[in-house]
Image: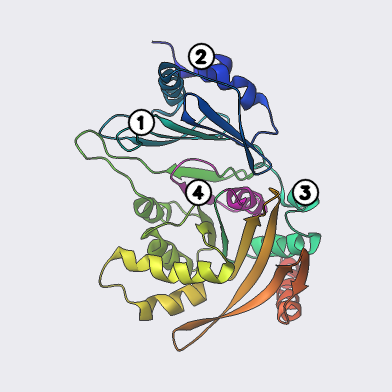
Amino acid sequence: MEKASEIEPSVVFGALYPFICDNSIEEIWINSPERIFIARKGKSELTNLILTAQEVRELVERTLLWSGRRLDLSHPFVDARLPDGSRLHVVIPEITAEHWAVNIRKHIAQSLSLTQLSEAGLLTPEISEFLQLAMREGLNLLISGGTQAGKTTLLNALASEIPYSHRVVTIEEVFEIHPRLPDVIQLQTRGANLQGDGEITLRRLVKEALRMRPNRIIIGEVREAEALDLLIALNSGLPGMGTIHANSARDAVMKLQTLPLLAGANISHAFIVPTVASAIDFVVQVAMDFEGNRRVTEVIALTGRTEKSQIEMETLWQLVDGKYVEGIALGSIQSRLHQRFTNARSEL
């Protein structure tokens, strides 16, 4: 059998290859062989391309050769990373009604630096400088937003601002985080085999990461009970960050208080609230508007204090009618952050 690494990309992607080569296209998806869509700048377009059901199946089989992941009736979903960093997701019948549903989310902007994202308009130079300092000082960040809002792109940029001397361990379902750092270990989950054994979850990977002498840990996306393990790690003095789906920065904090409860009946809300308050320093909300523009829409700080099961939060920046409004606590928090950075440099 021909090795996956020996197959030309043009052969692997077949009729989709021109879309793969077009850097203006962010995502490609197949609803049916006759309905193939692409997305440019957040807007979807129906293409003129028509395939057969057999061609779609063969396309998926060729792309999966790279990942080593399975797709069959016992595992009707697959989430895999392609060699260029693009992410492949496939669902087959009987989970779908009739046709194979295929998504290829391309790896385009995820290698941009924080400065480049600032130049592209995702955030202002002032917010960029603030986040750079936060990364250098080992503060804990949560990036929240909707699907395709730019969470992973911003996470990659922030991860590359971590000091070069730090050892970083990334934890993901599919490899998407690639910090431009010399000392990085990437961990990825694994599904169960045909016998139902061998599954490796995000929770397991967080625990294993703590045994690998990290200076930072990064979770690609916090979805379920792994939120508890992340909070415990961050409260042990290990800096880290991750992403979470939420409609606002404050909703993200509320969600982070709920997800750990999935870990078991012995986890109480009374324990989780102060744990979240002390574990997370800042939450950065990103969103995509109807025109496909991605922006940081809000940055909030958690003070570490709680009152009546409520976590105290301060707004640092908020995007209102296209302009950033600064919160009243911004000045004092910026001053403390700059002072910490100055003191750290003087001690070197």
Asked whether 3 or 181 is in front, the reply is 3
x, y percent for residue 244: 51, 58
x, y percent for residue 105: 55, 37
What residue does disc 2 label? 6
Q: Name the amino acid type tagged 1.
A: Glu
The numbered mark, 4 or 2, whose residue comes first in the sequence reads 2
Residue 126 lies left or right of residue 144; in this view the side is right
Asked whether 238 or 149 is in front, the reply is 149
Q: What distance separates the C-alpha of mark 3 from that of mark 1?
A: 41 Å
Q: Name the amino acid type tagged 2.
A: Glu
Q: What distance separates the C-alpha of mark 4 from that of mark 1?
A: 37 Å
Q: Residues within 10 Å of mark 4 (few under 14, many from 20)?
A: many
Q: Secondary structure at mark 1?
A: loop
Q: Name the amino acid type tagged 4.
A: Thr
Disc ID at residue 98: 1
Instruction: Mark 3 vs mark 1: give the one in front.
Output: 1
What residue does disc 4 label? 170
